[in-house]
């Protein structure tokens, strides 16, 4: 299942590495990454392949949110369909 | 790939900062197969059917919400108008209300609608029994909602029912006077009621609907307001309409996705997505503030009706482009006690019932959540209902009244319901009595608009 991981927070070294490591530990394959820094604000969007397991999806969403809180970042994991539905005709 | 990181961030911002949400997933359940000439057997079958169909509704909504990252605020149930079952079984209709209350609570939903009767052209004994039992039914239950359709463009207005509903509303408020007159807040009087509306308190499961159906109500006044704000003061009205349309498109798409997903997981067909800008008392989640953002100093001054007409129309156009299953009421709601901007205008004493009545000619529903003085007579309430129904009948649109007489209070006092129903000032009502006209009863014949064949 495809999901979107979004990360927003104050820029500093190691954010991408931290999120990518968390993905690797959970066997999540990263398909695409866009990131930019505007003034001091770090924004990153990752498209990832999640293991096919609903229970797992809930746990992963919880874990990444917790990771975000730890690192003073806002991290969301959402099913990619929501973005396709809203932004394409 | 059409998706860009800007789109993704826009969606996240809508949810995080602008209160975008799925307001309700409402499961419509037909009770026609529960009808029995023995009221107790009928109630047993109703309880069993609701539990069988709706037991997974709340867990499924929770799962979808987590997975897609979209808040789903309410799960609700609507059922076949109960007056039909009363017609078969006879007995005390309050038994049905208690059964619905228990089933809804056991299923974990927060409202159940359908303690209803459709009497636009005439009343059966079952309809009359149900209507007369509404005050007791709403006083002795917590989450049952009731609605009565008293008029339509096709049938005209049933003035006997209008007279009765004035008395019923007063009685609802009196029986719950120690509980913020809450009974009256759970009762809607409709003209041209729709059969697939997922929003409370007016939801019921129409008789032309399938056995079980999933309807979704999406909202998002905050999202529309921010989109209008970003356009700035120099954008022309047609540019503003275009922006609202595009925003409505996105919101509807989200609703459709969630509706289809809920339908797949629960194994019942998907019905409609109702895109209604339904305000909540939360800061920024206000329809009045959209109108103010369009360029009114306060929601009630000159220009308000025009701005609301454009808003309501643009919302529908965006919705209809996004989904072939747009239904329900789809438009802008203007419930006074649930909208921070409306409350402010009413507190200031500038927003009057008469202005709201004009606004209901161009918004999606009617005089909603309006608190009137406790000494407002049943005839006056009936007069307001008749006026509102006339607007709906002539304009071929749904109109409704949800009026709450605040027993023991007068204009300028303040009534607090709490939660989604909010709070508001008691609004003054014109004192001149319509008692003779209301006393006449009978029908207002169907208008010339009804003869389309």
Image: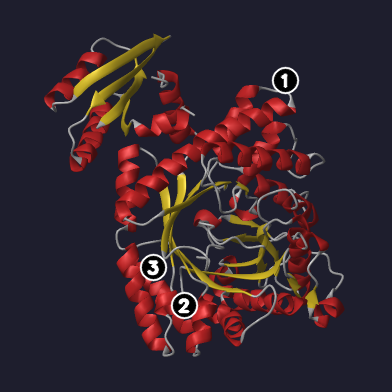
Indicate the secondary structure of the residue bearing disc 1: loop
Question: Is A3 situated above or below B419?
Answer: above
Q: Do circles 1 and 3 both sit on a common chain?
A: yes
Q: Do circles 2 and 1 both sit on a common chain?
A: yes
Q: Tell me the CA gap for discs 3 and 2.
A: 10 Å
Please give the label number shown on residue B104: 3
Q: Residues within 10 Å of mark 1 (few under 14, many from 20)?
A: few
The residue that mark 2 highlights is B97
Indicate the secondary structure of the residue bearing disc 2: helix
The quarter of the picture where the N terminus of chain B appears is: top left
Q: Residues within 10 Å of mark 2 (few under 14, many from 20)?
A: many
Residue B191, position in %: x, y?
Answer: 68, 64
Considering only order in the chain, which callout, 2 or 3, is on the residue closer to the N terminus? 2
Q: Tell me the CA gap for discs 1 and 3.
A: 50 Å
Task: State if disc 2 and disc 3 touch (CB < 8 Å).
Answer: no
Label 1: chain letter: B
Residue B35, position in %: x, y?
Answer: 43, 81
Q: Tell me the CA gap for discs 2 and 1.
A: 53 Å
Label 3: chain letter: B
């Amino acid at each position: 299942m495809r999901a979107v991981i979004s990360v927003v927070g104050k820029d500093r070294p190691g954010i991408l590495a931290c999120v990518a490591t968390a993905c690797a530990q959970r066997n999540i394959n990263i398909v695409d990454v866009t990131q930019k820094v505007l003034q001091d604000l770090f924004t990153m969007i990752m498209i990832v392949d999640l293991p096919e397991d609903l229970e797992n999806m809930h746990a992963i969403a919880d874990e990444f949110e917790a990771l975000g809180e730890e690192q003073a970042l806002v991290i969301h994991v959402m099913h990619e369909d929501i973005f396709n539905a809203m932004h394409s005709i | 790939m059409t998706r860009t990181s800007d789109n993704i961030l826009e969606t996240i911002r809508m949810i995080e900062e602008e209160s975008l949400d799925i307001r309700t997933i409402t499961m419509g359940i037909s009770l026609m197969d529960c009808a029995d000439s023995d009221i107790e057997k009928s109630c047993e079958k109703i309880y069993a059917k609701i539990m069988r169909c709706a037991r997974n509704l709340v867990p499924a909504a929770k799962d979808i919400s987590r997975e897609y990252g979209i808040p789903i605020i309410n799960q609700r149930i609507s059922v076949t108008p109960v007056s039909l079952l009363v017609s078969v079984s006879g007995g005390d209709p309050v038994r049905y209300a208690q059964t619905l209350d228990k089933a809804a609570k056991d299923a974990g939903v927060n409202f159940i609608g359908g303690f209803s009767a459709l009497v636009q052209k005439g009343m059966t004994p079952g309809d009359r029994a149900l209507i007369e039992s509404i005050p007791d039914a709403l006083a002795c239950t917590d989450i049952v909602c009731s609605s009565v359709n008293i008029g339509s463009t096709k049938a005209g207005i049933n003035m006997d029912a209008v007279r009765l509903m004035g008395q019923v509303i007063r009685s609802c408020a009196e029986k719950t006077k120690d509980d913020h007159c809450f009974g009256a807040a759970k009762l809607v009087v409709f003209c041209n009621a729709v059969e697939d509306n997922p929003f409370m308190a007016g939801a019921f499961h129409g008789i032309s609907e399938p056995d079980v159906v999933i309807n979704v109500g999406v909202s998002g006044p905050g999202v529309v307001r921010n989109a209008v704000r970003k356009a700035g003061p120099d954008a022309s009205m047609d540019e503003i309409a275009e922006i609202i349309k595009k925003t409505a498109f996105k919101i509807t798409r989200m609703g459709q996705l969630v509706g289809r997903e809920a339908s797949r997981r629960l194994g019942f067909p998907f019905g409609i997505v109702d895109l209604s800008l339904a305000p909540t008392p939360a800061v920024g989640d206000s329809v009045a503030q959209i109108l103010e953002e369009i360029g009114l100093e306060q929601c009630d001054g000159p220009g308000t009706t025009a701005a609301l007409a454009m808003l309501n129309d643009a919302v529908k156009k965006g919705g209809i482009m996004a989904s072939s299953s747009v239904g329900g009421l789809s438009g802008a709601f203007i419930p006074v006690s649930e909208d921070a901007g409306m409350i402010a205008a009413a507190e200031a004493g500038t927003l009057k019932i008469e202005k709201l009545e004009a606004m209901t000619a161009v918004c999606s529903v009617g005089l909603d959540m309006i608190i009137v003085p406790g000494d407002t007579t049943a005839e006056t309430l009936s007069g307001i209902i008749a006026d509102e129904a006339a607007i709906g009948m002539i304009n071929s649109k749904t109109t409704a009244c949800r009026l709450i007489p605040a027993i023991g209070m007068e204009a300028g006092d303040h009534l607090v319901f709490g939660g989604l129903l909010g709070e508001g000032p008691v609004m003054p009502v014109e004192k001149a009595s319509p008692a003779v006209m209301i006393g006449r009863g009978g029908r207002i014949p169907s208008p010339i608009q009804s003869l389309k064949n």
